Amino acid sequence: MSKPLHLNKLDAIRGFAAMYVLLYHLVSHLDFIPKSIKTIFFSFGQEAVMLFFLLSGFVIYLSIYKNPHITFKSYFIKRFRRIYSPFIVSILLAIAIAYFNGNLLKSFSWSELAGNLLMLQDFAEVKPGNWVNPFMDNLPLWSLSYEWWFYMMFYPIYKGLGKTPYCIYFVLGLSVIAYGSYLLVPNHASFVVSYFIIWWSGVEAARVFIRDGRFTYRNIQPIFFSLLFMTVVTAIPILHEAKIRLGYFPFLTFRHFCISLLAVGIGLVWYRQKLFWFDNMLGWFTHVAPISYAVYIMHYPILMQLNLSSYIPNLAITLVIKLALTFGLSYLTEIKLQPLVNSWIK
């Protein structure tokens, strides 16, 4: 097994997903870009997040596999400082931008801040049962609550059942039960757990790769079955809808599971073709990967909320400045600040 090669591929996909989400938000606010271009090429920001989930599960399994005796305390600290360090910077950034724009008092909410710090945020506009919105409308923060609780659920399940071949079906059962409970009483906790099987599919893929050294249709059948099963389950509520709205629950959830299933299928086919043209298409995104998390959670307040029009009326110059701020701050956060935090919190 060639670990460096395949980790580079994962980094490329992670960098690509972060850049796509950035472009997804940026392009949606540029009036000079034709609507047809936006619809065809820049309508899949949610799908990019599903790629993040799959990749995250894969990488977490690799990290635990290399350190099988890690305690929960050590695991928690590693995950906490990785998630919360850039997250807190993004919170301070949003506050600073709101102050600069002159709307801090209007947009700031203590309850919203507390809910986000507890990782309870989600995007209320597209689904019922939400508890708290992303802090100061920094929309990409919705997925962090999922990621955090996936991390917390992973450790006990892995320690208890991780070495059994049927662990993925246990997680599938949790997701099915959670989705059923969400349909009965819409709530954020159930909704998060219903998505856990997507993240765990990444875990299962890593387990298979370490065990067999390669992917085949046969050895990832449990992943296909689990995602297909949840795709069918999430399709059922759509049958009772008078009007289908593509970006809203319940179709949105069905769409997420469809794209996750499709991503695994495309990934397998591409892998069997020796990842033909992968480096030419996505290779350069490895350069973005080291700062991809910060780019993901910081681009929205800078690109979408920072108001420079009264100072710099030229759109092109404004975009250059905002992009420079996004990547510069992401670099400082991930490359300079994160190692310091890692040395402080042990």
Image: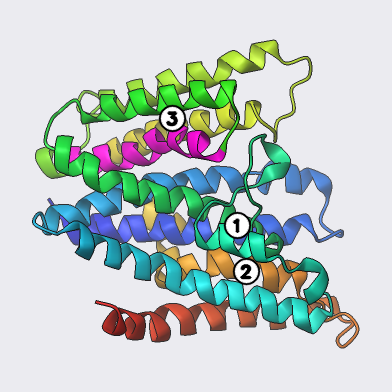
Residue 240 vs 142, above or below: the answer is above
Counting residues from the start of the chain, the first of labels 2 and 3 encountered is 3
Three-letter amino acid code of the residue under disc 1: Pro
Residue 215's disc is none
Three-letter amino acid code of the residue under disc 2: His
Q: Are marks 2 and 3 in contact (CB under 8 Å)?
A: no
Cα separation between marks 2 and 1:
9 Å
Which element carries disc 3, helix, strand or loop? helix
Estimate how packed mark 2 is, as few (under 14), some (14 to 19) or many (20 or more) residues with alpha carbons within 10 Å: many
**Majority secondary structure in the magenta region:** helix
Three-letter amino acid code of the residue under disc 3: Leu
Residue 265: image x %, image y %? 39, 31
Which element carries disc 2, helix, strand or loop? helix
Name the residue that disc number 1 marks: 140
Residue 299's disc is 2
Is residue 225 among what the camera can see? yes
Left or right of 60: which side holds 43? Answer: right
Counting residues from the start of the chain, the first of labels 3 and 1 encountered is 1
Q: Residue at x 27, y 58 (%)?
A: 7
Q: Are marks 2 and 1 in contact (CB under 8 Å)?
A: yes
Name the residue that disc number 3 marks: 261
- Nearer the observer: mark 2 or 3; the answer is 2
